[in-house]
Image: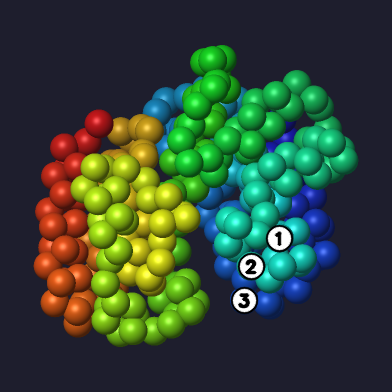
């Protein structure tokens, strides 16, 4: 498995896009971020060298479908396109995977991990190694999304300034899902605060202790919460509840 070759090929693939365009730039940074997060988690877990490289390779290719989504729709919204399914289609049905990985020995693992990485819930995988990598890419994806929510402008993420987000309320249905420690259904998000809370609900769908350790070390939950000035009194009270729940969940570990 030649990871450096795959990265070189990925750089050539990116020549098809305007790297200076905001959404493309963000997605490139996210791709490399997920690749690095995959390495960190896999190494902390003590996985084999092959599995560490495989985890990084999956990270590198996991959002291929997103680049095509940007090109066609200039959007990341899930109702526009199933980017995971489209990524699998262009990699494996159209054969693009051979541009990055010359051997087919790992195709099944790569395909399953990419296909499942954005599912609302991870289900239907019985093979132990496939399940490992499907869980790992989901954790790495969420871990780098924490970085995005901390460093990128709120206006870039949500389309409005942080102060406008904090004036809004959290929809009751969305808050109820969070209180049940569930991921937030995208179809129930109505306000910008619903979106912001859904990013924090990611922490209830982390698979490995090692990932939670990194989240705790980098104080991601607190830093994401603190990015918004909660001018709406009800929202401010609910976000303190959110803060307390996540402190207990992340502090306790798996």
Which residue is drawn at the image coordinates 48% and 41% (left, top)? 120
Marks 2, 3: nearer the viewer: 2
Q: CA distance from mark 1 to mark 2?
A: 7 Å
Residue 49, x across and y down, in percent: 56, 26
- Give neighbour class at mark 3: few <14, some 14-19, many 20+ (Cα, 10 Å): few
Name the residue beneath numbered marker 1: 69
Residue 77, x across and y down, in percent: 58, 62
- Give neighbour class at mark 2: few <14, some 14-19, many 20+ (Cα, 10 Å): some
Image position of 202 (left or right of 178): right
Which residue is drawn at the image coordinates 50% and 27% (left, top)? 123
Earlier sequence position, callout 1 versus callout 2: 1
Whether the residues at callouts 1 and 3 have beta carbons within 8 Å, the answer is no
Name the residue beneath numbered marker 3: 22
Q: CA distance from mark 2 to mark 3?
A: 11 Å
Image position of 113 (left or right of 181): right
- Report the number of numbered marks: 3
Residue 163, x across and y down, in percent: 30, 84
Q: Quadrant of residue 13?
A: bottom right
Q: Is residue 175 visible?
A: yes
Disc 2 is placed on an element classified as loop
Give the vertical position of 233 relative to 67 (above or below): below
Whether the residues at callouts 1 and 2 have beta carbons within 8 Å, the answer is yes
- In this orientation, which residue lies closer to the viewer: 237 or 200? 237
Name the residue beneath numbered marker 2: 75
Q: Is residue 98 visible?
A: no
Q: Quadrant of residue 155?
A: bottom left
- In this orientation, which residue lies closer to the viewer: 190 or 3? 190
Earlier sequence position, callout 2 versus callout 3: 3
Which residue is drawn at the image coordinates 29% and 77% (left, top)? 168
Residue 15, x across and y down, in percent: 81, 65
């Amino acid at each position: 498995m030649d990871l450096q070759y795959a990265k070189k090929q990925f750089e050539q693939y990116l020549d098809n896009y305007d790297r200076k365009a905001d959404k493309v730039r963000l997605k490139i940074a996210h791709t490399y971020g997920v690749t690095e997060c995959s390495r960190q988690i896999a190494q902390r877990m003590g996985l084999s060298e092959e599995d560490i490289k495989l985890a990084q390779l999956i990270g590198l290719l996991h959002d291929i479908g997103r680049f095509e989504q940007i090109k066609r729709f200039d959007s990341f919204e899930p109702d526009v396109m199933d980017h995971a399914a489209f990524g699998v289609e262009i990699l494996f049905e159209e054969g693009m995977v051979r541009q990055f990985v010359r051997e087919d020995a790992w195709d099944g693992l790569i395909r399953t991990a990419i296909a499942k990485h954005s599912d609302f819930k991870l289900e239907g995988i019985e093979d132990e190694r496939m399940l490992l990598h499907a869980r790992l890419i989901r954790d790495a994806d969420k871990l780098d999304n924490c970085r995005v929510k901390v460093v990128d402008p709120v206006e870039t993420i949500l389309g409005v300034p942080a102060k406008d987000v904090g004036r809004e309320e959290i929809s009751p249905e969305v808050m109820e899902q969070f209180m049940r420690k569930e991921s937030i259904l995208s179809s129930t998000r109505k306000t910008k605060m619903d979106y912001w809370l859904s990013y924090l609900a990611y922490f209830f769908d982390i698979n490995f202790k090692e990932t939670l350790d990194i989240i705790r070390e980098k104080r991601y939950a607190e830093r994401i919460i603190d990015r918004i000035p909660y001018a709406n009194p009800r929202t401010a009270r609910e976000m303190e509840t959110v803060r307390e729940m996540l402190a207990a969940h992340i502090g306790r570990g798996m």
